[in-house]
Image (spheres, rainbow, N blue to C red):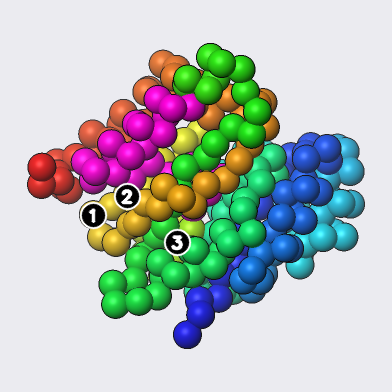
Amino acid sequence: MIARIAVVLPAYNEASLIGPALQALRAQTLAPAELIVVDNGSTDATALIARRLASRVIHEPARGCVNARQRGFAAASAPFVATTDADAIVPPDWLERIAAHFAGAAPADAVYGPVRLDSATRLQRGGERLYLRFVALMDRLGYPHFNGANFAVRRAAFDAIGGFRSDMRTYSDLDLALRLRGQARIVYDPALAARLGAGGWHRWEPSAACSRALLPAARAAWPRHRPAL
């Protein structure tokens, strides 16, 4: 049986980008069971464009990507939920590849892939290569590195850990991965790539803020689920 996968896309003032993102999702070789846009208080035409192209548009007044994504996951009725961003373009077989991982003899509970830059400077391309190596290394060490622009999860596994943490304004996707890793089968598919414009460089840029945000969750997860090396 082919998995039924809902897609959740949070958006805030993305009128210039959300159209192509939604068109890519509508052109999937495996159609989404639901295509849900969560408008996070946009003041431009984001919601108007979304209403033309998505199955549903939900308004989440509490600002913050984590609130919008949590609201979308709660609204989805399909047994699997995938998520991407309004400035990301996924390939035509994105959902088909995800569905294949949720089926088979050893079905996954979560699937994620890398996020790449569509156009970039030489420095940014170098940063992207380092980022991709880092994600692959973390996967081999047993530490999945979810990016909100490119992952999917079995709804039952998501609900079992309480979904996203609303107290994490940033890196809630990474925190979700750390909390899932000890009790769910997570698959990294390096060929399952979403693409961003060069403005998405901030997704790879190393920063002290990222380290500070992730370190408490990593410390909490490490003693309980130390991977075998």
Residue 18 percent location from the top left of the image: 77, 46
> What's the CA distance linking mark 1 and mark 2?
7 Å
Residue at 67 percent across and 32 percent down: it is 197
Decide which of 38, 20 is in the foreground and name it. Answer: 20
Determine if the magenta segment contains residue 123: no
> Badge 2 is on which residue?
179
Task: State whether residue 209 is above or below residue 185.
Answer: above
Q: Is residue 112 left or right of residue 44?
A: left
Precedes in sequence: disc 2 or disc 3: 3
> Badge 3 is on which residue?
153
Q: Which residues are magenta?
A: 128-151
> What's the CA distance linking mark 2 and mark 3?
13 Å
The image's mark for residue 182 is 1
Task: State whether residue 153 is above or below residue 133.
Answer: below
| Proximity of marks 1 and 2: CB atoms separated by less than 8 Å | yes
Quadrant of residue 25 in the image?
bottom right
